[in-house]
Amino acid sequence: MTRSGENPRPAAETALVTLSIDGREVTVPEGETILAACTAADVETPTICWAPNLTPVNVCRVCVVELEGSRTLVPACSRPAEAGMQISTDSERVRHSRRMVLEFLGSANDLSQASEIADWSRTYGADPARYEGSADGGGDLPLRPEPERVDEPVRIQDDLYIRAYDRCVLCYKCVEACGDDAQHTFAIAVAGRGFDARIRTEYDAELPDSACVYCGNCVAVCPTGALQFRTEFDLRAVGEWRPDDQAVTRTVCSYCGVGCNLELHVQDERIVKVTSPADHSVTSGHLCIKGRFGWQYVHAPAFEPPTTSVTEH
Amino acid sequence: MFGLGGGTCSYQEITETDVILLWGSNAREAHPIFFHHLLRGLDNGAAMYAVDPRRTSSAEFADVWLGLDVGTDIALSNTVAREIIAQGMHNRSFIDHATTGFDAYAASVEPFTLPEGERLTGVPAEAIAEMAHRYATADRAQILWTLGITEHHTAVENVLSLCNLALLTGHVGRRGSGLVPLRGQNNVQGGGDMGALPDRLPGFQLLTDPQVRARYESTWGCELNPVPGKHLTAMFEAMEDGELRALYVIGENPADSEANVAHARKLLEGLDLLVVQDISLTRTARMADVVLPAAAGWSSSEGTVTSSERRVQRVRAAVPPQGDARDDVHIISELAQHMGARWTATSAQELWDEMRSLSPLHGGMSWERLEASGGLQWPCPDDDHPGTEFLHGWLWEPDLDGHAPAPFSTVTHLPPAEALSKQFPLRLTTGRVLDSYNTGAQSAGYSSPIRSGDAIEISPADASDIGIVEGDTVRVSSPRGSVDMDVHVTDRLPTGLVFTTFHFPELVDANLLTNDAWDARSGTAEFKAAAVRIDPLPPLTAAAGGTSGPAVADRASGTAAAGGAGG
Amino acid sequence: MADLHFSDAEPTASERRAVLAALSVDEASDGAVVVSHPRVVRAGMQRRKQMRHQLLPALHALQREAGWISPGGLNFVGRTLGVPPAEAYGVATFYEMFRTEAPAHELSVRHVCVDPICALAGAASLAEHLRSQGHAVHEGPCLGQCERAPAVFIQGRREPDRVPADGSGPDSLLVSVTASAPETPSLLRHMIGRDHGHSESMSMEAYRERGGGAALDAALSLGTDEVISQVTAAGLSGRGGAAFPTGIKWRAVADGEGPKHVVANIDESEPGTFKDRLLCELEPLAIIESIAVAGLTVGAEHGWIYIRGEYPLATQRLRYAIAQAHSAGWLGDDAAGSGQPFDIELRRGAGAYICGEETALFNSLEGFRGEPRNKPPFPTTHGLFGRPTVVNNPETLLNVNEILRIGPEAYRSVGTEGSPGTKLFCLSGHVGRPGLYEAPFGITLGELLGLAGGVQGTLAAVLLGGAAGSFVGPDAGELQLSLEDTRAAGTTLGSGPVMVFNDTADMSAVVERLAKFFRDESCGQCVPCRVGTVRQHELVTQIRRTGRSTEPQRELLGDIADAMGDASICGLGHTAASAVLSAMQLGLLGDTAS
């Protein structure tokens, strides 16, 4: 699987395949996915667990499409495009499964900070309330028991980021970024099974006691705000998180000589978040602790004499 | 290498190589995102040999860690070379085609038999032989290094000894094979590219070449001094000799970052004039007669920096400078005005265009191309040139494309300048850790949950010999000074070796210990090898704080103020 | 800072010993990090990758020794194998048989099955009884002993695992319709009427006297192409439930580049299924022989047995059979004189229904969470360790032995055109003689029930195919049990379980338990199944509570079923609603209200 942005050079002599997306012929390089073919055909496809800089895990299933000849729907994000495929992206079956996936997530998680999922939910008419006790219209019947939800407290264990797993839809992105798609630290994994599966350190150890090196790559790929930078969390707490007022400027990290591109998200003349472009050949969107968090000195009061412990010694 | 001061490979190539020698580099912590590329290479099946006195976190990913004695890199590389030649694994056709000086080189490494290599380096002969064989017989192989190679009094010869291995095996000038020095600072490559070297003009053009000078003189409308200047270490020598009396320091914190820093401070204090231009009030700035507050170059200025793969990329202003701080270009232009110069180019783009009109390496890198692309790799001589992924492909071309053959260098093994003694029986080496950086001007500004402060790391056997345990505070002394530090016992260090970082100089003045013996050719001081002694402190002394011995909690809180930008 | 970061927790001496013994490694020279000299350490990613597949055996050893996967023990396993502790923890928490919290006792744990057949047979009161006697009891899913319900499995603490019914009760009932005619296929031919308790009958000598070894000899003399063409001509399809043509699978792997693998999938966990357990217990050498036939035919070097953790007797006998096969030269560098290397390694599961899914099985065997992989790519090209892999059920493999014994034409003499040969049926519940029955494909359900002594009482429903199958009503006696007929009737044979319920059974409780089964056994990887199985169970619970279903409830169940069936990753999700839906259609879940 080639990752976008991985190889800046045009691949030599890549074969092309032509397939049909909703009745339109589309040609993409061999090895590309149905998702890429949909994009090439200007067909918008919802995704949650897919990211351009991670290996597709195809677990959220919101990108499923109908492939002629296939008994079940297939995930667009990971299924390689093959010549002659007949794909439908807007059939009743596709719309139904997408709606149900979004509805399931809405019924189980706090999606209040997952704006993209909320948009898709509206598009597909997802109605998580259908699972709630009062929604069955059963008049004389007792209310259904409350549907089980992912119920987790917010974890604040350091100054760099928070974890709010009631928002976690188990997309595996953080595990991938922490693991062999980027950081190879493996501080977190999926533990437990079924609906009880959660992202965990070993024995749910506090993050600073785990293998975590605070690169923040997990936070950067989280689609629901289950992982969130402290800056964002704190600003949200006081109602001051305003993405629409944020300018994003691309620059280069000020630390070592690798040349990581940074996107500085600036609100009210202050950096509030640092990301990296997923399609940049150096970072593929991933950073280290210094690049991700080492910017705060920029806002330290300039030229104050050294304070605190220094003056004590 | 071979005339150009840049790594020969692109990062992408490490994902495609077969054998990696990571030599004197803890890239996992010092170059974490480059290490991501390296990890992909390992995932793809590459074998890695980590050569380092410490078993670093990078070495954990290596198939084999070779723990050589500090300062025996040349002994090791010469042994590797001799073994390759003895086994007939050297690339004879490449050597004949593209190099000179092989016979003399072969003769010079002849004494470095495997047993001799083991005796000199402490690494068992079998491991040396294995690394030699794997490197020599690999289809593609790279040698990567960092300051573990260059912060020695034999810096240049250390580098040349690694270049010799690449020439011996033909592991240079081909995709996936090469020599890669990883740059420690975001623009140390760019600084060199731009002529911030005593004998160079932008694009590594020799100052002493009259034709080169003439082009600059005609563009700049002034005459250039043809005599190469001094590098940093030579400047301190000149201060000592009384020859250098005024110093203008931009973005460097020598009062914290120099080896044998007590001596450096004394020299700085003795200057007639010290001007410091920096983003924070470093220790050097606090000693200055004039301080020019500068804007952070990466977040409040426009310009370019160049990475370890020779990639020139744009930096852009995202936030206004704090207080009265100004952009470096602005400050220097203002100074020039006051000195009577009539400089016209004042924007970053205008300066860039002027530079690229004079540096053929950068000629094709228009501002527009830099804006539009994810950066361009030099050499990029003209507007249609895509930039260069790897250097020295000419080594494999017929007639070397008109180049002179690449010379082997005969290099001599010299032990560290400071020998161990009864009085100072332990070898101290220094380096970075993941979450901190140099003297802390930047990295001390954020609160890292994994920060542990500058401790003295020591092997369990040595700790037990001295009678100290984890968390004790001890006095570490070298012939130049003493520092009180907390103890961290780790099995990642062989006996006889201790290690510290230098990220919190206001708290732990580690460079009081380091040796300012330096390499005559590069001017690099031997940060990596000092002789020290460790003495336990009686509990009362430790509690009182000593010269510098703060509680770890203070450091862990990350509240230590800015230290310095340089180092 | 170390990249593989462990807490300070240390293993106990006995935990260390147990892990090292299980892995048969020398800590100093075989671990993920080998300090061969103070200045030379061997480690690295390739080494870690090569050791990872020993994680499950190591966790088994810890669990048996300490009664849980303790932090110190997990650290030791992680250090030894180079597995990050978070990952090892993620694996440990995936399985029913591993605990990650310290037990309050020093006891072996009695697992009591609470799935439908055992529930009918009084599992709840058995569990209560065991508890009252001071035993540690864990109520869980099917243990594969449905013919002798209620089932108990004892997970040993510092003692071997065992099943109380093994060796103590009467031998399980085996019936074969085809065994008496030598020129027809019969898997049970030599198993019926033998004294299975005697170790002599398990010897290679005795097995050869029964005709054992002939398939291997035939396979070697016929060669790859001829074996595969006979298997193809015989029309053999997989007996694990998916019914994929075996010849096509073998051909694809034979054509693939090595290294290649053969995996015997003995993780049968489908409620109602116990056939593989009996096959392995009764004729283990035949299983080994059949794996060797597969391996040498497709050119695989590595054979693997992945067997349910709850099958201690079958495991023990297979291990003994592997040892004998070694002695006999069937396995080794020159396996059966073929000139090819082939060996078999046995791995125990640890309690996870999903690991019967072939790609989940691969992940489990490789030391990862038993989460299914998306297909394609298929195991024939990207199977175990990413290599071309034949994965077959023991019943399927034994059928190859039969094809090689009598030839494809004779093989096709029984069964139907679309489903040649015989099928093993696991009869349980309200029948006269629960047990394992071999009958030609196409036998009617009524005939099969008749073979088993008929229905006890008045038939209410039969669950065909287990939890992943569907209910048929009392009127289904004429249903022909072939792949094509069941498919046409909207049901499935699955792996062959036939669970019989008479009118005394609380069918809504049965259905709720099936819904709970899927909720518990969903691996949690994909959204439709992870959440869908929960919502389905909630709805079924509610319907059962009120005794009738409303139109919105039925619509919602249908919506959930469609999404799970269409959008889940694997067969578990695809089939998680079929039993519930069929029960609804048959009115087993109460009345319908508008």
Image: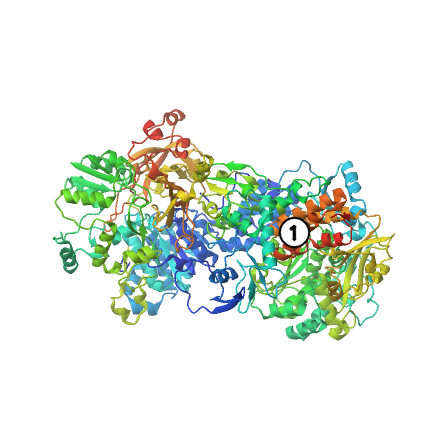
Residue at image x 71%, y 57%? C318
Q: Is residue B164 left or right of residue C134?
A: left
Q: Nearer the viewer, residue C114 or B61?
A: C114
> Dot 1 surroundings within 10 Å: few (below 14), some, or many (20 or more)?
many
Q: Nearer the viewer, residue A276 or C164?
A: A276
Percent of width and height locating residue B397: 31, 70
Percent of width and height locating residue B538: 39, 26
- The quarter of the picture where residue B221 lies is bottom left
Residue placed under numbered mark 1 in the picture: C560
Percent of width and height locating residue A189: 54, 47
Relative to C552, say whether C320 is above or below. below
- Residue C347 in sight: no
Chain of the residue under the numbered disc 1 shown in the image? C
Percent of width and height locating residue B409: 27, 59
- Residue A305 in sight: yes
Q: Quadrant of the N terminus of chain B?
A: bottom left
Looking at the rendered structure, the kind of residue marked 1 is Ile
Q: Is residue C56 left or right of residue B246?
A: right
Element class at badge 1:
helix
Q: Nearer the viewer, residue B316 or A181?
A: B316
Q: Is residue C245 left or right of residue B475?
A: right
Q: Quadrant of the C terminus of chain B?
A: top left
